Amino acid sequence: MTLCSNRVPLAGSPSTCTIDTVLIPLPTWLLLAALPLVFILLRSRRSPPLIRTSLQKTIWVIYLVLLVADIAMSVLEMARLGVAKLGLGLLPFNTIGLIIVIVMVGCRGKVSWMLFPLGFFWLLLVAFEAVKVSRLSLLPSKTPTQYPGSDQVLDNAVMLALATIFSVLDTYEIIVLWRSRRRSHDALVIHPGLSDGSLPLRAPSVPSYEAPK
């Protein structure tokens, strides 16, 4: 099967073939290119883990569940493109990227800076999915029969919504991380002894005074 076949031509650019072979896989390619640096930093620079509240833990679980749903949607899209003999482009790279993201999401509880490559990945994917949905909306709603344009728009709109949710959640986590680091910095400025452990975390207990009998 060719990368793209039997695609409905659209006026203007980019074409749906260009979107599926270049734009959508691009965030994954950049993530793959950054993985060696990620592993080097993972081994050499262990940042303190994020201390999560119960709300943040709940959001983290929802994040993982929605990420699995996003992978399922990408597989569904490829299956329907294959049945309609429209060609998959390089969309399998997008699925691979989402699987890598699951691993990184699992690691980011221990390595807080993992938020930044994930945030960049989602930001790019939101932009490119928005372009794709915009272009697919120009397709005839009832053709091709096996995967009509209306269904293509719906499937990709769902994936765009999920990517937007992930981008918002990562932005929230980055803000929480920044505030946490800011509070730690302010505490060290006020109490420099906290940095080397010379300042006790608790005030020493004072023995109670008992009047002589």
Image: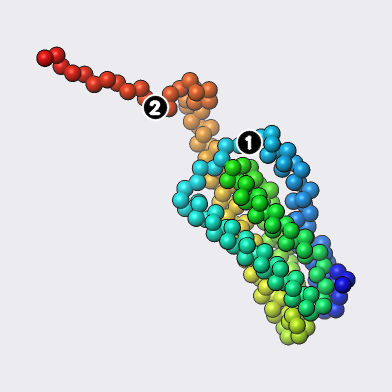
Mark 2 is surrounded, within 10 Å at the Cα level, by few (under 14), some (14 to 19) or many (20 or more) other residues, namely: few
Residue 84, image x, y percentages: 79, 79
Residue at position x 75%, y 71% from top?
A: 78
Q: Which mark is residue 66?
A: none
Residue 66's image quarter?
A: bottom right
Mark 2 lies on a secondary structure that is: loop
Residue 80, image x, y percentages: 74, 76
Mark 1 is surrounded, within 10 Å at the Cα level, by few (under 14), some (14 to 19) or many (20 or more) other residues, namely: few
Residue highlighted by disc 1: 46
Residue highlighted by disc 2: 202
Mark 1 lies on a secondary structure that is: loop
Check the picture and name the quadrant holding the N terminus.
bottom right
Check whether the beta carbons of the residues at disc 1 and disc 2 lie within 8 A of each other. no
Gap in Å between the C-alphas at discs 1 and 2? 27 Å
In the picture shown, does residue 35 fall above or below 206? Answer: below
Residue 4, image x, y percentages: 85, 72
Could you tell me the amino acid type at mark 1?
A: Arg
